[in-house]
Image (spheres, grey):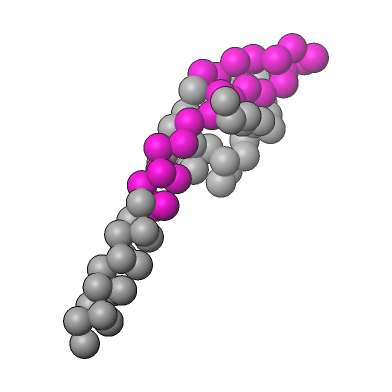
Amino acid sequence: MRKLILKSIFLVAISMTFYSCKRDVCHDCHYDKAGTEVEMGEYCGEALENLEATGTYTDSTGTYEVHCHGH
């Protein structure tokens, strides 16, 4: 029983570590507008996940595909 509890604690700790690391990931993002690359800056964690999920940026002139690259 003790080994089972220790294994469970170990698995939970490993899972939390991987989840935490993923949320701290940051990428520089940009979109192309009229042949020019427009820098959007660095996005991290949930903001990066949301931007990558939609994959687009919209302003008054249109909607553009966003590209994000890790460091």
Reply yes or no: does residue 46 show up in magenta. no
Up/down of 9 relative to 51, above or below: below
Up/down of 26 relative to 18, above or below: above
Look at the image and tell me in which quarter the C terminus lies. top right
Residue found at x 26% / y 68%: 9
| 46 and 8: which is toward the camera | 8
| 8 and 59: which is toward the camera | 8
Q: From which residue to which does the magenta span run? A: 18-41
Residue found at x 62% / y 35%: 56
For the image shown, how many numbered marks are present on the structure?
0
Q: Could you say where residue 57 lies in the image, as x and y percent from the top left?
A: 59, 30
Q: Could you say where residue 53 lies in the image, as x and y percent from the top left?
A: 56, 46
Residue found at x 48% / y 31%: 26
Reply yes or no: does residue 32 show up in magenta. yes
Quarter residue 6 falls in: bottom left
Is there any visible trace of residue 66 in the rendered image?
A: yes
Q: Could you say where residue 49 lies in the image, as x and y percent from the top left?
A: 49, 43
Residue furthest to the bottom: 1
Q: Could you say where residue 60 lies in the image, as x and y percent from the top left?
A: 59, 21
* Position of residue 2 in the picture relative to residue 40 (left or right): left
Is there any visible trace of residue 58 in the rendered image?
A: no
Residue furthest to the top: 36
Residue furthest to the left: 2
Residue found at x 41% / y 52%: 18
* Position of residue 59 in the picture relative to residue 62 (left or right): left
| 17 and 57: which is toward the camera | 17
Quarter residue 67 falls in: top right
Quarter residue 22 falls in: top left
Residue furthest to the right: 35
Look at the image and tell me in which quarter the N terminus lies. bottom left
